[in-house]
Image: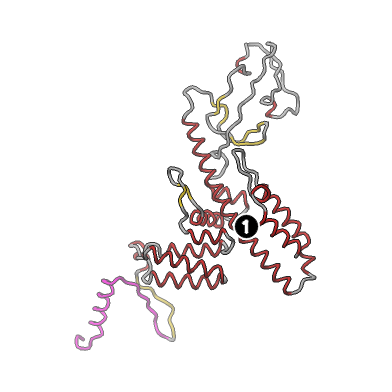
Amino acid sequence: MEAVRDFIGEFTACGDGAQGTDRGAAPARPSGMDAALAALRAVGSTAAQDAGSWGFQAASDFAGSVEELSRTVEYLQLVAAAAVDRTRKRSAAAAAGAAAGVAAGAVTAWTTGWRESPGGWQTGAPGTAEPAGDSLASAPAGMAVAAAPLGTPVGAASAGIPFPSAHAGTSVAAAPAVPESVLDDGYRNTVEFLRARLRIGAAEARRRLCLADALLPRQGLAGQPVPPVHPELGAAVAAGEVASRAATVITLALDRVRHSCLPEAAAAMEHALTRTAAENDADFLARVSRSWAEALDQDGAEPSEELLRQLQGAFLRKPRHGLQHLEIFATTDQFEHLITVMNTATNPRTG
């Protein structure tokens, strides 16, 4: 228990320099995540043994601390999913623009797959031209090019290892760094990428992306900051007061009444459900959100013509107590015709 309390205190007290995320033009290295993960693993390595000596109060405090941590982690999951989606789309757009701007006649050295560079494996972008200078293909006829030693890595040429040739000093020029791209990463969309990278289901990946789009701040077309769709709920999730699953229940209820109530009523519903989620369990929240949705949208959404065609008709059901059971779904006009025929057939005066 002491280790858990010390970890929570250190995690909340430290700033971005130790427990946050590194910022800068270079690829961000989430050093705070590494420290937090190491601390959690240290606590988890002895938690099962320590739990055997806890009393009820200590066990309940530990459960509450773990739940607070989980809500914070769930918010970070939303931030991470949104960041992956944003950077993936931005990289794809930049790569497409670079490919469109390649000059006519430029030689495309590599278009698909992965390549190894001195800095490690990275994805290449279409339109990467070979560097200017002597190449193997430009050697005079009859020139013998010695093979590279066995075991020479693929990126050895770009690292500056010369190839012996007839001309002294002739070597393969170093290839420029290949920009990162996601055009050929093997995944059709961000949902599939998150499913493979994080080992989660497609439904969970889609839920995180949809929830992040509704709760996190956005950017406009000109790059200006745009407030989130549900600011109060987003602030509660960021503060660790509301779990992401509960936030999903609230956003679904708000989407249901979005076109059938005034903005003031929707804001009041968001405030009430956010407070309910922060103070009650998920089952109670589901009942309250359903009551709010039914109160603001009593008639429900208007059914489409296609849905009416699928539902209407007469259906024979299982007989009950020796009586035949017939179930009819009809429109208003069809119902009036049926009632007229039935009344005429059962009227003794017309027999």
At which x and y percent is residue 147? Answer: 72, 21
* Magenta residue check for 323: yes
Q: Main secondary structure of the magenta part?
A: helix
Residue in the image at 46% along x and 43% along y: 223
- Using the rendered view, name the quadrant where residue 113 is placed: top right
Q: Residues within 10 Å of mark 1 (few under 14, many from 20)?
A: some
The count of marks equals: 1
For the residue pair 58 and 287, the one nearer the viewer reads as: 58
Q: Please state, as top left, top right, bottom left or bottom right, where the N terminus lies in the image.
A: bottom right
Amino acid type assigned to the residue bearing label 1 in the image: Val
Q: Quadrant of the C terminus?
A: bottom left
Segment colored magenta: 322-351
Instruction: Identify the element where label 1 is drawn.
Output: helix
* Residue 263 image point, x, y percent: 39, 62
Residue sitting at x 49%, y 31%: 99
The residue tagged 1 is 73
Q: Residue at x 65, y 51 (%)?
A: 15
Colouring convention used in this rendered image of the protein:
secondary structure
**Any magenta on residue 232?**
no
